[in-house]
């Protein structure tokens, strides 16, 4: 399903609203370029990347924002065990610099959280700026007993429960549990696989 958003105050989107839709295979190159531009070369060294390495996103939970046929935003969610409790980790979230402050980030977040809830997931965790993510209900109060597999700032480890009490028993390390990306056989497929793993 594609959701169309139009922010009345946003002049640049007045005539051509943006759409949030499921990510497509053909989005990968543009998505990777957006993530490179948003996070720089060091993005593969970020702690949360350890939860995505070699994994596929959770089914039905990778979204693109598109404006005038161009990919301008991305968000994905990943299966994890949060100290034994099933949860999702959200990220990376990015919006093209030319389209920021138009509500696209918020639309991606709201769409992704609604989709995760509709699929029965109980909680979403992320590492990010508390000021930005508080508007979507994220706070550090449910993550005090959790840890990431690498350096992280405790006040930036945030979560929102989609089902009350979903993280009550969540103690310990957050670990990847998503489906592993398969090893393809052909050379072309192997190249695509490496691109996907690098992208994840
Ligand atoms: C964060 C990001 C996704 C927001 O996208 P967006 O489409 O601009 O978001 P929205 O339009 O919904 O909201 C924009 C508002 O959030 C604010 N905001 C953006 N990043 C923020 C942050 N890190 N902390 C606090 N507020 C922030 C903006 O100042 C803006 O405020 P305004 O509405 O008063 O002008 C985008 O700035 C981005 O891609 N940044 C680079 C990558 C990144 O940092 N991703 C998040 C990783 S934690």
Image: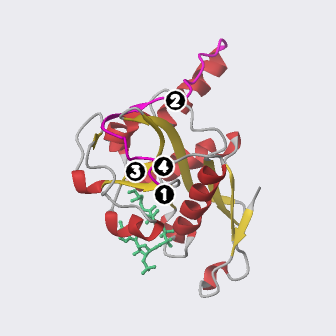
Q: Which mark is residue 126?
A: 3
The stretch of residues the image draws in magenta is 164-186
Q: Quadrant of ligand 1?
A: bottom left
Closer to the chain start, of discs 2 and 3, is: 2
Q: CA distance from mark 4 to mark 3?
A: 10 Å
Name the front one of labels 1 and 4. 4
The nearer-to-camera label among 3 and 1 is: 3
Per the model, the C-alpha gap separating discs 2 and 3 is 17 Å
Mark closer to the chain start, 3 or 1: 1
- Say if 146 sits above or below 63 in the image: above
Which of the two discs, 2 and 4, labels the residue nearer the N terminus? Answer: 2
* Mark 1 to mark 2 CA distance (whole Å): 19 Å
Image quadrant where residue 111 sits = bottom right
Q: Quadrant of residue 2?
A: bottom right
On the image, the x and y values in percent for residue 52 come to 45, 34
- The residue drawn where x is 33% and y is 64% is 130
| Residue 155 in the figure: left or right of residue 57 | left
The answer to which of marks 1 and 4 sits earlier in the sequence is: 1
Check if residue 73 falls in the magenta segment: no
Q: Are marks 1 and 2 in contact (CB under 8 Å)?
A: no
Residue 57 percent location from the top left of the image: 56, 38
How many marks can you see?
A: 4
Confirm or deny contact between disc 3 and disc 1 (CB under 8 A): no
Disc 3 element: strand
Q: CA distance from mark 1 to mark 4?
A: 21 Å
Residue 62, relative to residue 196: is it above or below?
below
Q: Looking at the image, is mark 4 or mark 3 nearer the viewer? A: 4
**Beta carbon of the mark 3 residue lies under 8 A of ligand 1:** yes
The residue that mark 2 highlights is 55
Residue at the spot 56% in from the left edge and 26% down from the top edge: 179
Please say if the residues under marks 2 and 4 sit with CB atoms less than 8 Å apart.
no
């Amino acid at each position: 399903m594609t959701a169309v958003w139009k922010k009345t105050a946003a002049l640049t989107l007045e005539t051509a609203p943006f759409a949030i839709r499921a990510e497509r295979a053909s989005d990968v190159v543009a998505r990777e370029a957006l993530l490179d531009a948003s996070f720089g070369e060091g993005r593969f060294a970020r702690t949360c990347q350890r939860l995505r390495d070699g994994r596929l996103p959770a089914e039905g939970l990778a979204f693109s924002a598109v404006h005038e046929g161009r990919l301008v935003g991305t968000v994905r969610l990943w299966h994890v065990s949060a100290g034994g409790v099933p949860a999702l980790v959200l990220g990376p979230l990015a919006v093209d610099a030319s389209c920021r402050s138009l509500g696209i980030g918020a639309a991606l977040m709201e769409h992704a959280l609604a989709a995760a809830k509709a699929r029965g997931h109980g909680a979403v965790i992320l590492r990010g700026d508390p000021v930005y993510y508080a508007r979507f209900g994220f706070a550090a109060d449910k993550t005090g007993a959790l840890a990431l597999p690498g350096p992280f700032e405790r006040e930036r480890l945030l979560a929102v429960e989609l089902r009350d009490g979903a993280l009550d028993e969540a103690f310990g390390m957050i670990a990847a549990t998503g489906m592993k990306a398969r090893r393809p056989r052909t050379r072309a497929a192997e190249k695509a696989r490496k691109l996907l793993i690098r992208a994840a």
